[in-house]
Image (tube, rainbow, N blue to C red):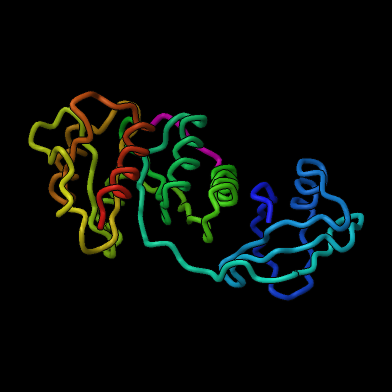
């Protein structure tokens, strides 16, 4: 099978013959330039991944036939990133790269220094595209924005939570493999201005404070570094 075969997330392909909706038709016809007989990989959390073929192109949809299953669905190990919103281009970069690196749950946060709002539907589309291109089997969730204080006081209990606090000489540095064993990991990263003093205090009381570098990192760099470190160090 050619390694260049297109790969498309098709949440509604529950039978051997299925129809993709209008928005996917536009992408398949106008971007990927598929025609009847074209083959591609379709995947979702129910059917896994299948080699498929375009059977019929209609005005508002495309009929697809499944040929054979290439992979069964396997859910990724849970990994969370709680990110204070930053400027849209940088936020999209975080979603794209951290999806490629395996984040399963994104939490959008608003802190004292947050100055941006992002279109969550666009971020979800970025996550889908990154999942398609990186060959992962599931699509990460992206939750609606919550205030940082509220989030910290109600941290999802299944994760061990770390907070990336720069200029904090008491924070764990470098990351220790022993810290990354056990329960799934979650990381909290601040906005461009970092965290306020009150937010830092709350984070230190409820999470494990870490530093990622001797240098001061941009928010998007810190987010990607957290997830990359988790992947490299976790056994």
Left/right of residue 49 with respect to residue 152 in the rendered view: right
Q: Residue at x 43, y 62 (%)?
A: 76
From the viewer's perspective, is residue 147 above or below residue 137? above
Which quarter shows the N terminus? bottom right
**Which stretch appears magenta?**
114-119
Q: Quadrant of residue 193?
A: top left
- Of residue 103 and residue 69, the one placed in the foreground of this image is 69
Q: Residue at the far top: name it.
A: 215
Q: Position of residue 163 (x, y in %)?
A: 23, 43
Q: Position of residue 162 (x, y in %)?
A: 22, 48
Q: Residue at x 57, y 67 (%)?
A: 71
From the viewer's perspective, is residue 27 above or below residue 10? above
Q: Residue at the far right: name it.
A: 59
Q: Main secondary structure of the magenta part?
A: loop
Q: Position of residue 168 (x, y in %)?
A: 13, 32
Residue 4 is covered by the magenta coloring: no
Which quarter shows the C terminus? bottom left
- Of residue 192 and residue 129, the one placed in the foreground of this image is 129
């Amino acid at each position: 099978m050619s390694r260049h075969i297109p790969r498309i997330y098709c949440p509604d392909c529950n039978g051997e013959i299925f129809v993709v909706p209008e928005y996917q038709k536009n992408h398949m016809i106008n971007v990927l330039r598929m025609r009847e007989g074209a083959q591609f990989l379709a995947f979702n959390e129910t059917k896994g991944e299948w080699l498929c073929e375009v059977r019929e192109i209609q005005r508002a949809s495309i009929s697809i036939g499944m040929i054979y299953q290439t992979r069964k669905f396997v859910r990724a190990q849970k990994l969370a990133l709680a990110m204070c919103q930053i400027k849209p281009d940088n936020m999209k970069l975080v979603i794209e790269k951290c999806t490629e690196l395996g984040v399963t749950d994104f939490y959008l946060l608003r802190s004292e220094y947050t100055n941006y709002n992002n279109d969550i539907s666009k971020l979800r589309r970025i996550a889908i595209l990154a999942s398609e291109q990186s060959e992962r089997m599931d699509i990460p969730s992206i939750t609606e924005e919550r205030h940082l204080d509220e989030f910290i006081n109600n941290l999802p209990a299944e994760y061990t939570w770390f907070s990336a606090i720069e200029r904090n000489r008491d924070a764990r540095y470098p990351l220790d493999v022993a810290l990354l064993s056990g329960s799934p990991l979650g990381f909290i990263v601040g906005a461009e201005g970092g965290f306020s003093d009150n937010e830092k205090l709350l984070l230190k009381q409820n999470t494990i404070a870490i530093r990622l570098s001797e240098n001061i990192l941009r928010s998007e760099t810190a987010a990607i570094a957290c997830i990359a470190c988790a992947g490299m160090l976790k056994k």
